[in-house]
Amino acid sequence: MSLTSNDIKAYQATTMPTSLTTSTVGGAINTSAEITNGTIGEVLPSLASSLSGGGDKTLYAKYFLKNVSASDDLPNAKIFVENLLDDGPVGNHNITIRPSAAGDDSTVVAKLIGFDSGGASLIENLPLNGDADVTSVGQFSELVAVESRLASGGALVRSVSQWTVKKNTTVVGYVPASSYGATSEVAIGLEASLNGSSTTTDATTAPSGITFSKPKDYAGGLAVATGTLTHGDAQAIWERWINPERRATSPDFELVVSIQGDI
């Protein structure tokens, strides 16, 4: 037999954050709590941003990817999040979106969420034009998120193709095909051994020994401990969410977490 996608499952840690004050976050894998729907509360709770002067809110959570195969390992395994955005160049810049297929047309907008030159919240709904560049009217000092939404009514809709996201002329990330968008608010880090059970004091305290980054593809992905996700074992992933002060409200948050290796 060979490993299939059904052999990799996501599970919560023993203690998941329900607010900023949750204590002893993390711990061992909880195999009774599989992450299946990606709904709010499975990994991160709902959290409103601070008003002006309140500062950013930073929250940490831990979950696992487990190889549940009875016999097959995943060598050269790396973990990455396909829809993370880099900060990009400093200064105030237009945002350009380019889908890779004609199906992402003017019935869909790229909802740009970020901040203007004065630090005020800035939102722009940018109509798409198939596989052509579309560029924002407003200039963003910071791009927080890009969401795929219907032009009529504003409901979330999955992208047809991958979108390239640029700040000025610099590619800062991608909206993957069949996803709801991309975000700059999250970074991840891996524990140094499989089946890790470390905790952190509370939901706002960084876990010890974890380095956070934004790997977006296999080439830049984070290698699992020992390099191989062996059958029956799990890799712990710590997630850091920075919710910026004065961020425009959005009820929707999706991460495209991927693991890839040799089979």
Image (cartoon, helix red, strand yellow):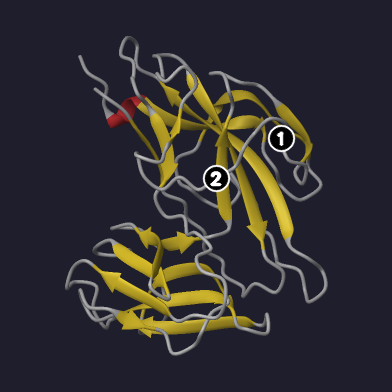
Q: Residue furthest top?
A: 71
Q: Is residue 255 above or below residue 52?
A: above
Q: Residue 115's quadrant in the figure?
A: bottom right
Pointer 1 residue: 207
Q: Residue furthest left?
A: 102
Rendered-image quadrant of the C terminus: top left
Q: Is residue 24 above or below residue 17?
A: above
Residue nearer the viewer, 181 or 78: 78
Pointer 2 residue: 213
**Which x, y percent locates residue 148?**
38, 70
Q: Is residue 46 visible?
A: no
Comparing marks 1 and 2, which lies closer to the viewer?
2
Q: Please report whichever mark, 1 or 2, sits nearer to the chain's N-terminal start.
A: 1
**Which x, y percent locates residue 256?**
41, 49
**Label 1: few (<14), some (14–19) or many (≥20) C-alpha neighbours in 10 Å:** many
| Number of numbered discs overlaid on the protein picture | 2
**Which x, y percent locates residue 163?**
31, 65
Q: Amino acid at mark 1?
A: Pro
**Which x, y percent locates residue 122?**
57, 82
Left or right, 225 with respect to 209, comes to left
| Residue at left offset 70%, top offset 65% | 48
Q: Is residue 95 above or below residue 194?
A: below
Left or right, 122 with respect to 35, comes to right
Disc 1 and disc 2: Cα gap in Å? Answer: 14 Å
Rendered-image quadrant of the N terminus: top left
| Residue at left offset 58%, top offset 23% | 192
Q: Is residue 133 visible?
A: yes
Q: Residue 104's quadrant in the figure?
A: bottom left
Q: Amino acid at mark 2?
A: Ser
Query: Is disc 1 placed on a helix, strand or loop?
Result: loop
Query: Is disc 2 placed on a helix, strand or loop?
Result: loop
Left or right, 156 with respect to 185, comes to left
